[in-house]
């Protein structure tokens, strides 16, 4: 089984490189965006990147399932499923803000085993392999050891979806942490936590393609990731806390009654 997982990691890396080239080639060029509803946008670049990833998966692993942000899910006959976000941070990309990337995860028997995130502007390639650690450009990374009072908190920017609990959570945390950031890309948020540049990320409404690779990255970097009740996360999770582990229980307590 290890060889099967390694083979899929190789293709995930190849796909991330291909998509990164597309994203850089088209960055800051005129883009037509279409609404998917509820102020979510999709561009031809999203679709081109998705197509590049899916072609590679179907070429090498046609029996694998694929769950992607922009297409209907395809079923698996191999117990492997790919969970991909071809362009994470679409709104940033459209506005020529250079915080965006690609997120590719591989799930085996409902457990994430590979996570790849590529941030093409900074040329940062993050790779997590279940029980084998987390790396950025082949350098092993780890979460910080900062306590909550010194922590940088990344908080969900989609406050419009459910204003009251999200603002309540933010209020609970605002005077307990050192500072608060919102970057508009889950791939960026989670990679920052994994390498200790931020200490905690709280999200209310992410989809599996947003976090599947990133949460594995955080865990393999020595951090912790759960839902708001402290339960183990899965592809079906909607809200989560990802942290350096040091602050996790405090964060859970502060978010316990926001609903």
Image (tube, grey):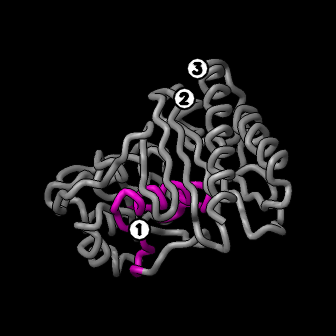
Q: CA distance from mark 1 to mark 2?
A: 31 Å
Q: Which residue is mark 3?
A: 28
Q: Which residue is mark 2?
A: 95
Q: For the residues marked 2 and 3, what is the alpha-carbon distance in whole angstroms?
A: 8 Å
Residue labelled with disc 1: 225
Q: Is residue 159 visible?
A: no
Where does residue 45 sit, x and y in percent of width and height? 71, 32
Alpha carbon distance from label 1 to label 3: 34 Å
Dot 1 or dot 3: first in sequence order is: 3
Compared to 62, does 231 lie above or below? below
- In the rendering, which numbered label is found on residue 134? none
Placement of the C terminus among the 4 image quadrants: bottom left
Does residue 250 sit above or below 92 in this rendering? below
Q: Position of residue 170 (x, y in %)?
A: 31, 62
| Residue 222 locus on image (x, y percent) | 34, 62
Q: Secondary structure at mark 2?
A: loop
In magenta stretch: residue 144:
no
Residue 137: percent from left, percent from top: 44, 36
Q: Are marks 1 and 2 in contact (CB under 8 Å)?
A: no
Residue 86 falls left or right of residue 66: left
Q: Quadrant of the N terminus?
A: bottom right
Which is closer to the viewer, label 1 or label 2? 1
Out of 224 and 58, give the one closest to the viewer: 58
Query: Looking at the image, which is closer to me, 87 or 177?
Result: 87
The mark that comes first in sequence, 2 or 3, is: 3
Is residue 219 shown in magenta?
yes
Please provide the residue range marked out in magenta. 202-230
Q: Residue at x 26, y 64 (%)?
A: 171
């Amino acid at each position: 089984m290890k060889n099967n997982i390694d083979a899929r990691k190789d293709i995930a890396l190849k796909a991330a490189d291909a998509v990164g080239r597309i994203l850089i080639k088209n960055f800051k060029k005129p883009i037509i965006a279409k609404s998917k509803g509820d102020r979510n946008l999709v561009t031809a670049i999203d679709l081109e990147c998705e197509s590049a990833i899916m072609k590679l998966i179907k070429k090498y692993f046609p029996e694998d399932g694929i769950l992607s942000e922009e297409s209907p899910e395809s079923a698996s006959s191999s117990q492997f499923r790919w969970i991909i976000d071809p362009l994470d941070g679409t709104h940033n990309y459209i506005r020529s803000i250079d915080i965006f990337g690609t997120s590719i995860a591989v799930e085996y028997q409902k457990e994430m085993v590979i996570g790849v995130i590529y941030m093409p502007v900074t040329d940062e390639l993050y790779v997590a392999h279940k029980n084998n650690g987390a790396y950025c450009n082949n350098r092993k990374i780890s979460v910080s050891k900062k306590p909550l009072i010194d922590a940088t908190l990344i908080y969900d920017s989609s406050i419009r979806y459910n204003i009251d609990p999200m603002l309540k959570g933010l209020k609970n945390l605002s005077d307990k942490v050192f500072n608060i950031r919102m970057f508009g890309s889950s791939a960026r948020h989670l990679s920052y936590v994994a390498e200790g540049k931020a200490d905690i990320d709280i999200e209310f409404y992410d989809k599996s393609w947003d976090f599947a690779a990133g949460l594995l990255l955080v865990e393999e970097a020595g951090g912790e990731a759960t839902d708001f009740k402290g339960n183990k996360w899965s592809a079906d999770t909607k809200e989560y806390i990802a942290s350096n582990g040091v602050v996790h229980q405090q964060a859970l307590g502060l978010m316990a009654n926001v609903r």
